[in-house]
Amino acid sequence: MTDEWAPELVAEPTKDGVDRAVRAARRVVDGLVRAGRGSAADLEGVAGELERLADHLEDHAPDLGERIRQMWGVGGLEMTRHDPVTGPENALAPPLVVQGRSEKEVSGEVTFGLAYQGPPGHVHGGCTALVLDHALGMANHWAGTSGMTAKLALRYHRRTPLFVPLQVVARQVSVDGRRIVTTGEVLTPDGEVCVSAEGLFVVIDVSGAAAAMAETLAEN
């Protein structure tokens, strides 16, 4: 066990290609939420441009089955490129950047913009739940025993602020056969706990799941 930071546990974004396009898409989403219906911007023109871009992407995308094979046909950190929490290829990701902290603990940072608002000026509780579920899963992977979420218990201690770098910490607590218990928190820059979580994970063999899903999509 060490107090030194380990290498990042997520794929490193590139400066061009799909990663650049995803960063631009995040800016568009943030810009639309900030603009709103009363904006002086030419929103009809924006809508037309976005529709043309969407048509272009859809026309050049592989079928869903092939795309799933591509996503899961890689190894290591490349498998994190598309996830909705850390993925540089996923515009839904805030994104959370995570590193290993000790042999069973991970820690990361995330800043939520206006698109993730729940209460005024604060993060929607479902967004912090998503981030914690993912962070707990990453802690399990880092510790060497991974599983699927069976139960996630959350406690909301205080409102979680938007626009500031939040710390996300998770650690594996115990492994008993196929059952894994993991805990974690979302904290303010001052170290105040906003949300805490305890998860029960179950070790399940998911080998071949991507191929099976791809085949199912191809048949439909």
Image (tube, grey):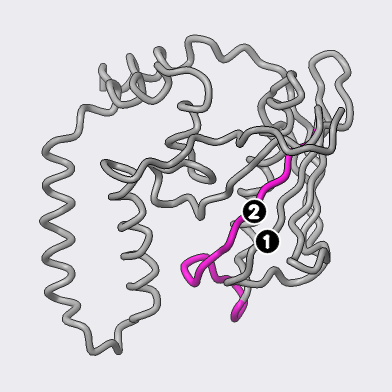
In the image, is residue 120 part of the stretch drawn in magenta? yes
Q: Residue at x 81, y 33 (%)?
A: 102
> Where, quadrant-wise, is the C terminus in this rendering?
top left
Farthest-out residue, front: 4
Spot occupied by residue 171 in the image (x, y as percentages of width and height): 81, 37
Residue span colored magenta: 105-121
The tally of labels here is 2
Mark 2 or mark 1, which is nearer the start of the sequence?
Answer: 2
Q: Is 164 situated above or below 62?
A: below
Q: Give 104 or 198, whichever is nearer the viewer.
A: 104
In the image, is residue 191 part of the stretch drawn in magenta? no
Q: Residue at x 32, y 57 (%)?
A: 25
Spot occupied by residue 39 in the image (x, y as percentages of width and height): 28, 87
**Residue 64 shown left or right of residue 92 in the figure:** left
Spot occupied by residue 85 in the image (x, y as percentages of width and height): 54, 46
Are circles 1 and 2 on residues that touch, CB within 8 Å? Answer: yes
Q: Residue at x 82, y 63 (%)?
A: 191
The residue indicated by pointer 1 is 166
Alpha carbons under labels 1 and 2: distance apart = 5 Å
Q: Is 46 situated above or below 152?
A: below
The amino acid pointed to by label 2 is Glu
Q: Give 174 or 220, whichever is nearer the viewer.
A: 174
Label placed on residue 109:
2
Q: Residue at x 77, y 59 (%)?
A: 195
The amino acid pointed to by label 1 is Leu
Spot occupied by residue 45 in the image (x, y as percentages of width and height): 12, 74
Q: Secondary structure at mark 2?
A: strand
Q: Secondary structure at mark 1?
A: strand
